[in-house]
Image (tube, coloured by chain):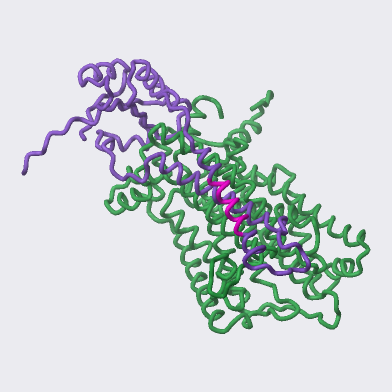
Chain colours: A green, B purple
């Protein structure tokens, strides 16, 4: 905190940018967060969102059922474009998950105090996003009931997985990622479940939260081991995030398709993942703080910081776009050069230019503090980036496949109703899970917020 | 009603309003020679476990072992299946093509370490344990909200009901109470 000259405008900005607003005590902060779950009546905004998400989740279920009945022919995919919406959705959803882990793990290692009030729901976002991602490749399989053949287990066919295949790496990466994310999230929840157990009035809630709390007592030795384990999980989850999206990018870069076979893919994909993930964190946190009255905890400071990280990730993504174009021409490879020109001028050119507009041009407005402090603008911007990043993955996948080496085998991809149903349905299911989480579990870590209250009291904040 | 059998008390508990008072009290109880002391706080208080004389938590060692076990076993599995049990010539690559074995090895190292850290923490903490006598302490539900507690267990060799109570009173707590077993 430095400003020597204190103008009224400066003061307003300073107070808006606090990590924790208001004068809270340990008791009042505990009550405020746990009351969302325990006592507060359901907000109409929640009911409206929940109804919409339930309807979309039903659409998702119907679309999956019809897919399992009929087969992948109900989608627009065919040779040469055999990968399209499902794989795009997969990469997009995994990417969204990464921001949650980044917030909860990497920012913890860096001792960023503003992480405290957003890590819990960011982790929930990760779990639900990775769940949606995990469904997609299974839906995409021609025979989804054999998906477990990717796992190594002794079987009567005497077969083992092909360890040199990135699809096998994928199942290890995604499997590890979802398990570690759930462990990290649940572990952080244990002390808060104990708070809910102790504050709940009804017997049912006491029992349910009590079972979840595993008998947590908050004893000093328990806290000490808890802290060590939590820090270790953070240290493990950070490289895990990088590895997971690198492995996802190997799914493409190990192949020799023009536009995929490139060494920039791992960092390009990781930056893109964080870019869209932080956008989703904004899309979620802005209505969340409004509906549940959490503006003292999720302040403009948080939105400002998230926007800054988005800007950085967006610049790395923009750099990657430039390098892709440069390398295509620098390589002198006929097919690579054609792929780049085809993206810009071919039948999918509008998508390419929308990607550039949404992911490169519009996010540059984040350089301005006025934009970063305007909540509505940030909300719109976050949706723009989410759409832009989905289209980017679609562009990478479809424009590379639809015209590869032999002009005689070129083709087009057009999505069908069922392609859209799976995409929109997965959004609904994600929202449904998230809304359930907000209603039944503390969306902000109560025990860590108490620590923040203490630090504020001691003037360490 | 049947008469309840009379059990010896679990211990004595003192309640404090903030974390500094609790750390001070824990230090003084430890200096007084008490060893079976527990301190309860609604958040992780710096220096509290050290004040109780607890310094090594061993969670990191368990996580290391879990990570090594996870990574080594999946590398072995890859080597065994690709070289011994199911050798396939894949594009002329060596059967033991170790660079391709790294991703799964890395992921399983992380998974092994994470599982070991989580379950190691739970087991060392004696969780899950849904019932504990400390929950009988009056007002203990505030230990997960805004109150700080110090408990001296009756199994401590230096524990004397009257003397220990007087000692706790001298620490200026909000109140001192007996915990039934």
Residue range highlighted in magenta: B66-77
Which quadrant: the C terminus of chain B?
top left
Give the main secondary structure of the magenta stretch.
helix
Query: What is the x, y in percent for residue B33?
Result: 34, 17
| Residue at the spot 32% in from the left edge and 47% down from the top edge | A200
A195 left or right of B105 in image = left
Query: What is the x, y in percent for residue A293?
Result: 48, 47
| Residue at the spot 57% in from the left edge and 43% down from the top edge | A234
- Quarter residue A204 falls in: bottom left
Query: What is the x, y in percent for residue B103?
Result: 66, 55
- Quarter residue A427 falls in: bottom right
A297 left or right of A268 in image = left
Q: Is residue B73 magenta?
A: yes
- Quarter residue A154 falls in: bottom right
Determine whether A83 is above or below B70 in the image. below
A2 left or right of A39 in image = right
B113 left or right of A256 in image = left
């Amino acid at each position: 905190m430095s400003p020597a000259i204190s103008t009224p405008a400066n003061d307003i900005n300073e107070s808006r940018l606090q990590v924790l607003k208001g004068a809270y005590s340990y008791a009042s902060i505990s009550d405020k967060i746990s009351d969302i779950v325990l006592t507060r009546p359901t907000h109409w905004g929640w009911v409206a969102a929940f109804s919409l998400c339930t309807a979309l989740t039903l659409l998702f279920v119907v679309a999956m059922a019809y897919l399992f009945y009929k087969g992948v022919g109900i989608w627009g995919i065919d040779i040469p474009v055999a990968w399209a919406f499902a794989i795009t959705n997969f990469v997009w959803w995994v990417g969204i998950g990464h921001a949650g882990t980044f917030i909860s793990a990497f920012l913890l290692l860096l001792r960023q105090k503003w992480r405290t009030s957003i890590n819990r729901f960011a982790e929930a976002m990760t779990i639900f996003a990775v769940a949606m991602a995990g469904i997609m490749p299974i839906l995409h399989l021609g025979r989804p009931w054999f998906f477990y053949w990717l796992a190594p287990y002794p079987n009567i066919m005497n077969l083992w997985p092909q360890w040199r295949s990135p699809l096998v790496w994928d199942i290890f990466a995604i499997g590890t990622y979802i398990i570690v994310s759930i462990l990290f999230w649940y572990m952080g929840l244990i002390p808060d479940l104990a708070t809910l157990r102790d504050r709940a009035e009804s017997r049912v809630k006491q029992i349910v939260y009590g079972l979840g709390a595993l008998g947590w007592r908050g004893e000093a030795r328990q806290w000490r081991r808890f802290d060590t384990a939590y820090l270790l999980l953070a240290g493990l989850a950070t490289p895990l995030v990088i590895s997971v999206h690198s492995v996802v990018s190997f799914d493409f870069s190990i192949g020799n398709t023009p536009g995929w076979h490139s060494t920039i893919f791992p960092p390009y994909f990781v930056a893109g993942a964080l870019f869209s993930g932080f956008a989703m964190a904004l899309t979620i946190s802005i209505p969340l703080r409004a509906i549940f009255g959490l503006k003292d905890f999720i302040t403009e400071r948080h939105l400002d910081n998230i926007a800054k990280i988005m800007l950085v990730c967006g610049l790395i993504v923009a750099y990657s776009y430039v390098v892709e174009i440069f390398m295509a021409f620098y390589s002198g490879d006929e097919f690579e050069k054609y792929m780049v020109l085809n993206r810009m001028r071919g039948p999918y050119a509008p998508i390419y230019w929308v990607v550039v507009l949404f992911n490169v041009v519009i996010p540059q407005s984040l350089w301005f503090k006025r934009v970063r402090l305007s909540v509505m603008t940030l909300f719109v911007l976050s949706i723009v980036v989410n759409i832009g990043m989905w289209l980017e993955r679609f562009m990478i996948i479809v424009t590379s496949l639809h015209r590869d080496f032999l002009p005689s085998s070129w083709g087009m991809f057009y999505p069908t109703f069922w392609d859209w149903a799976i995409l929109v349905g997965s959004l609904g299911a994600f929202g449904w899970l998230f809304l359930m989480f907000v209603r039944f579990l503390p969306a902000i870590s109560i025990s860590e917020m108490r620590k923040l209250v203490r630090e504020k009291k001691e003037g360490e904040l | 009603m049947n008469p309840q059998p009379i059990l010896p008390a679990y211990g004595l508990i003192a309640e404090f309003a903030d974390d500094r008072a609790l750390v001070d009290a824990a230090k003084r109880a430890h200096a007084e020679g008490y060893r079976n002391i527990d301190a309860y706080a609604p958040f992780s208080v710096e220096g509290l476990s050290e004040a109780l004389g607890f310094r090594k938590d061993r969670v990191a060692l368990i996580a290391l072992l879990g990570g090594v076990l996870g990574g080594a076993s999946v590398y072995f599995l890859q080597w065994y299946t690709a070289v011994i049990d199911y050798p396939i010539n894949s594009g002329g690559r060596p059967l033991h093509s170790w660079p391709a074995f790294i991703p799964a090895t890395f992921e399983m190292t992380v998974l092994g370490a994470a599982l070991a850290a989580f379950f190691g923490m739970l087991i060392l903490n004696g969780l899950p344990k849904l019932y504990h006598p400390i929950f009988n302490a009056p007002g203990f539900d505030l230990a997960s909200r805004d109150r700080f507690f110090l408990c001296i267990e009756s199994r401590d060799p230096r524990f004397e009901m009257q003397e220990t109570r007087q000692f706790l009173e001298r620490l200026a707590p909000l109140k001192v109470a007996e915990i039934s077993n």
